[in-house]
Amino acid sequence: MPASTVSAKRRRASMRAAGVSSPWVMFLKGFFKHPVMVGAIASSSQRLVRHMLAPVDWENCKLFVEYGPGVGTFTRPILERLAPDAKLIVIDTNPDFIRYLKHVIDDPRLIAVNDSAADIKRIVADHGFEHADFIASGLPFSTLPAGVGDAIAQATHDVLRKDGAFLVYQYNPKVRNFLTPYWEHIDHEVEWWNIPPAQLWWAWKK
């Protein structure tokens, strides 16, 4: 039996033993358990991921933060691009997603936190940083409880370094309403090779 097959079987057995489901099952569970906190019923395409991450200045990124990592669709590509001495903090209010990521991603640069993105300033400080260089989010701002989206946007702007950016991928163009009160320089594109097509936003702190 090929080594890759043996390794895959061991990984699946380990996941079952730890009570961790497959990525697809985890995603569906998260959607039906907390629909207002999950932006879509399907994971983002890899083309969307590449498009979203393309403007990041990886050479000068020591702390990347991701809101709502889910099953790691963005988490893994971020780690692939991140410098060896940098850190990635992922924040999710769903403890199932955090437990899943801790179990399936063995990387010392990953810090998985079960908390709210609205507390980003405290979370960044708790891990020894003064600011974040880039922050990515797939949170569905338009369906979050009243006031939460604005609180996340303001806290995100405050914690970003100068020339850093808030990377937001959404399916509702109204997300711009949460960005414009805090950012003046906002780039926008649409990724059509995704189901459904996604709105991409890069809010730069100038």
Image: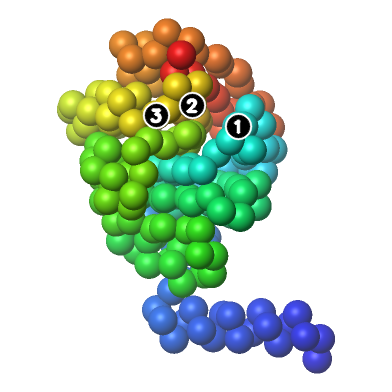
Provide the secondary structure element on which disc 2 rests: strand
Q: Looking at this view, is 84 or 73 the one in front?
A: 84
Q: Amino acid at mark 2?
A: Gly
Q: Hey, which residue is sitting farthest right in the picture?
A: 2
Q: Amino acid at mark 1?
A: Val
Is 4 left or right of 112, judged from the image as shown?
right
In 3D space, how far apart are the residues under numbered discs 1 and 3 (Cα atoms)?
Answer: 13 Å
Quarter of image, res 54: top right
The answer to whether the residue labelled 1 contacts the one labelled 3, judged by CB atoms less than 8 Å apart, is: no
Residue 116: x, y in percent? 26, 45
Q: Does residue 36 sit above or below 206 in this rendering?
A: below
Q: Looking at this view, is 30 or 112 the one in front?
A: 112
Q: Amino acid at mark 3?
A: Leu
The answer to whether the residue labelled 3 contacts the one labelled 2, judged by CB atoms less than 8 Å apart, is: yes
Instruction: Report the residue marked by disc 1.
Output: 56
Is 136 left or right of 74, judged from the image as shown?
left
Instruction: Report the residue marked by disc 3.
Output: 160
Residue at image point 28% right, 24% down: 154
Provide the secondary structure element on which disc 3 rests: strand
Instruction: Report the residue marked by disc 2.
Output: 164
